[in-house]
Amino acid sequence: MNESCNFCGNKNFQDKNIQYIYRRSEQFLIANDVPCVQCEYCGEQYFRADILKKIEKEVNEIYSLKKKIKREISVPVEHYIELQPA
Ligand SMILES: [Zn+2]
């Protein structure tokens, strides 16, 4: 990537593999080790379009086509109003 960051204008980026959390309404997918470039100044992450498409395709296969997944975690869900005071 030889552009500047959309948020801070910095031109230095680092290649990274990160944990990407995809969400579309109630459908979630955690994808580990997803390649991105990260702005060295503000930390904003940029993903290639083909990588995001691949993740979307995977989400579609899991939720619509019932593709078998390798690993699943359960995630607690709370309403803020019901939380105990700190
Ligand atoms: Zn930046």
Image (tube, rainbow, N blue to C red):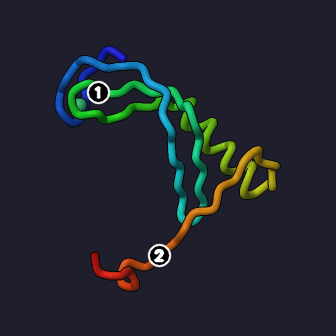
Residue 22 picture location, percent across and down: 53, 49
Residue 4 picture location, percent across and down: 24, 23
Foreground residue, 40 or 60?
40
Q: Which residue is mark 2?
A: 78
Q: Compared with residue 38, is residue 57 higher up or lower down, i.e. above or below?
A: below
Mark earlier in primary sequence (2, 1): 1
Q: Quadrant of residue 55?
A: top right
Q: Secondary structure at mark 1?
A: strand
Q: For the point 23% across and 33% down, which residue is it?
A: 42
Regarding ligand 1, which quadrant of the image does it lie in? top left
Q: Secondary structure at mark 2?
A: loop
Q: For the point 81% across and 55% down, which residue is it?
A: 66
Q: Residues within 10 Å of mark 1 (few under 14, many from 20)?
A: many
Q: For the point 26% across and 24% down, which residue is it?
A: 40
Q: Is residue 22 left or right of residue 74?
A: left
- What amino acid is at disc 2? Glu
Q: Quadrant of residue 79?
A: bottom left
Q: Which residue is mark 1?
A: 39
Disc 2 and disc 1 in contact, CB within 8 angstroms: no
Ligand 1 closer than 8 Å to label 1 CB: yes
Marks 2 and 1 sit apart, C-alpha to C-alpha, by: 33 Å
- What amino acid is at disc 1? Cys
Q: Residues within 10 Å of mark 2 (few under 14, many from 20)?
A: few
Q: Quadrant of residue 53?
A: top right
Foreground residue, 48 or 42?
42
Ligand 1 closer than 8 Å to label 2 CB: no
Q: Is residue 37 left or right of residue 50?
A: left
